[in-house]
Image (cartoon, rainbow, N blue to C red):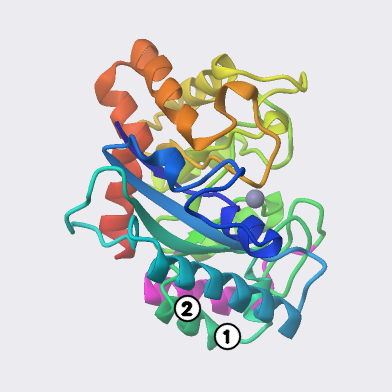
Amino acid sequence: MKYFDLHCDTVYECSEKGKELLKNDLQISLKGGENFESWVQTFAFWIPDVLRGEDAYRQFLKEYAFLSRALEQEKQLHLYTPGAPMAPGHCYAIPSVEGGAALGGVLSRVEELHQKGVRMMTLTWNGDNEIAGGIYGSSGLTPFGEQVVAEMERLHMAVDVSHLNDQSFWAVEKKLGRPFAASHSNARSICSHPRNLTDDMIRAIIERKGLIGINFYVDFLSDSKEAGFEDILRHMEHILDLGGEDVLAIGSDYDGATLPDCINCVKKIEKLYEVMVQYFGEKLTGRILYDNAQAFYRQYVF
Ligand SMILES: [Zn+2]
C-alpha cells in the first residue's frame, strides 16, 4: 500500500528528546513504514506558542538542522521529488512549518524557508502570532499576514489553514487565489472541537481544489473522548458526502497528539488500509491515502 501523510510532529519530538528517526519509541520511525510500497511523509517543524521573534526562528533552525542531518545519515530517508523513482520501504520527506511564528515577523524569511525545502506552512498554532489568529487567539489575518500569504502564493508554498480561528480562515480564503490545505483537521459537524472544519469551510476547500488531511487525535475524532476506526470513517464519509473525493487525505498528527490504540503508530496504517478498502473499496482508499495529496503537490506546489 501507498501512504502520503500531510502532518506529523516527529522532528520536534526527536530533536527535543535526542531520539533518532530510524528507530525510536515514537509514533513514527523509518522502521515503522518499512512495509509501505511508497511513503511520503510531511515532517512539520513545530513552533510552540511560547516562542516568538528570533526565539521562534531559532527553533525552526534547530528542527531544520535535525532533519537535514537525518537526510544525510539515513539511507532510507530522502527529500520528496514528485515524479522521481521511489524505493519501496523508504521514506520521502516534505519539510513543513507548523506555526508561521517561525518567520520571526520577517517577510524575506518566507523565501529563505522555501530555499531550505519547506513546501507547506501552517500559518499559526493555537495562539495569535504576527500573521493571524489561532483557535484560542483573537486576532484575524494581519497586514503582515496578507503579505506572507501573497509571498507563499508567489513561491508556490502551500498555505495550511489548520489551527486558524474562523475569522482568520475566511480572511485567508478570501485573500488566496491558489488552492490551500487544512493539513490535519476533521469535520466539526461530526466532532464539535473548534480545531475542526465547518461544512462551509469544507465546501470552500473542495471548491478551491485543496486538501483536507484527517487527523487521528481522539479529541478531534469524537466528542465522547474515545475513538476508533469507525470515527475516522465517519469523518471521511461526511467530507465525501459534501463532494470531497478529490480533497480527502490523511494528516495523522503522529507524535503531536493522543491517538486511539488502533492507529497509534505508523505501522498501524496497514490496518487502516484494510478497514478502508472494506468500506470504500480499493480505488477510493488509494485516493485518500495517497493519490489526492500527490496530485495536489504535483499540480500546485512543486
Ligand atoms: Zn497541529
> Does any portion of residue 53 appear in the rendered image?
no
> Does any portion of residue 36 appear in the rendered image?
yes
Location of residue 290 in the rendering, given as x and y in whole percent from the top left corner: 33, 39
Q: Is residue 285 left or right of residue 233?
A: left
- Mark 2 vs 1, N-terminal side: 1
Q: Quadrant of residue 94?
A: bottom left
Q: Secondary structure at mark 2?
A: helix
The residue under the point 33% across, 61% down is 78
Few, some or many residues within 10 Å of mark 1 (<14, 14–19, 20+): some
Magenta stretch: includes residue 154? yes
The residue under the point 49% across, 78% down is 113
Location of residue 105 in the rendering, given as x and y in whole percent from the top left corner: 67, 83
What is the span of residues highlighted in magenta in the rendered image? 139-158
The residue under the point 26% across, 57% down is 299
Location of residue 25 in the rendering, given as x and y in whole percent from the top left corner: 61, 43
Beta carbon at label 1 within 8 Å of ligand 1? no
Q: Is residue 299 left or right of residue 13?
A: left
Which residue appears farthest toward the top when viewing the image? Answer: 278
- Identify the residue position indicated by label 2 in the image: 151
Q: Secondary structure at mark 1?
A: loop
Q: Amino acid at mark 2?
A: Glu
Image marks 2 and 1: residues in contact by CB distance under 8 Å? yes
Magenta stretch: includes residue 3? no
Q: Quadrant of residue 139?
A: bottom right
